[in-house]
Amino acid sequence: DTGVSQDPRHKITKRGQNVTFRCDPISEHNRLYWYRQTLGQGPEFLTYFQNEAQLEKSRLLSDRFSAERPKGSFSTLEIQRTEQGDSAMYLCASSTLLAGGYNEQFFGPGTRLTVL
Amino acid sequence: AQSVSQHNHHVILSEAASLELGCNYSYGGTVNLFWYVQYPGQHLQLLLKYFSGDPLVKGIKGFEAEFIKSKFSFNLRKPSVQWSDTAEYFCAVTTDSWGKLQFGAGTQVVVTP
């Protein structure tokens, strides 16, 4: 079990630049989630995929944010025209549906974004 | 709006002391409840979970939590902490079938030798 992996682990960019993060979920997991965590807060939900379908987006996900999961495996999160307020840890989690409809999420190490 | 509240932001205690971290949620329907832990430099790990059944759930490393529906609470306990329990602890709730998690703000626990 290789777990959920994320790349890069750290990203420093200048305001206005575009950045893209990648998440590779646990191989048999069909659900994939993106969260954002800022200092002193718990993670906040951004968006969710079941296989390749993006099923829900938080209002936190402005038009500058886009997420894809083209083949139902890895996912990318792109932020266009970054702003200093985008500085945060971006977390990916994956899960599979358990018997009874339950859902247990496994988290990756996160990508820490710093926007200068 | 739905929310998850963790009562303490920082807790400092000595080894062998007992630990209890409070978690309350505001949602009247069916919930699934979780405690996650983040050790220094590591990613979020599941400590324990409640889906249904016995409201007293046991997790890894000697932790347990009790779901009290009438109080909308899911408090985490450990009878005797170790220095290695130094970490940040997050309570989380799901209220829908998609399972997106709503987290509390976290409690930073420091255990002194």
Image (cartoon, coloured by chain):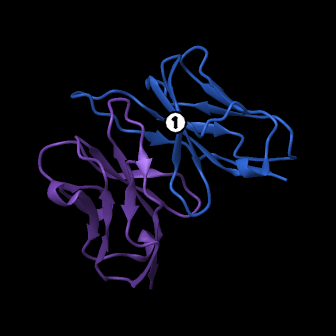
Q: Is residue A67 above or below residue A115?
A: above
Q: Secondary structure at mark 1?
A: loop
What is the display colour for chain B?
Answer: purple
Q: Would you identify the image quadrant in which residue B65 lies? A: bottom left
Number of numbered labels in the structure image: 1
Look at the image and give the colour of chain A.
Answer: blue
Q: Is residue B85 left or right of residue B48?
A: right
Residue at the limit of the structure toward the left, as seen here: B54
Quarter of the image that includes the C terminus of chain B = bottom left
* Residue B109 percent coordinates (x, y): 45, 73
What residue sits 21% from the left and 28% below the top?
A100
| Residue linked to disc 1 | A2
Q: x and y percent of residue B46 in the render?
A: 39, 50
Q: Give the residue at x 27% y 55%.
A: B59
**Residue at image x 51%, y 34%?**
A33
Residue B63 in sight in this render:
no
Amino acid identity at mark 1: Thr
Report whether residue B81 is seen. yes
User: Which residue is more in the foreground, A28 or A112?
Assistant: A112
Q: Is residue B1 above or below residue A64?
A: below
Decide: is A42 above or below B6. Answer: above
- In the rendering, at what x and y percent does residue A77 appear? 66, 31
On the rendered structure, is B107 left or right of B93? right
Above/below status of A81 relative to B34: above
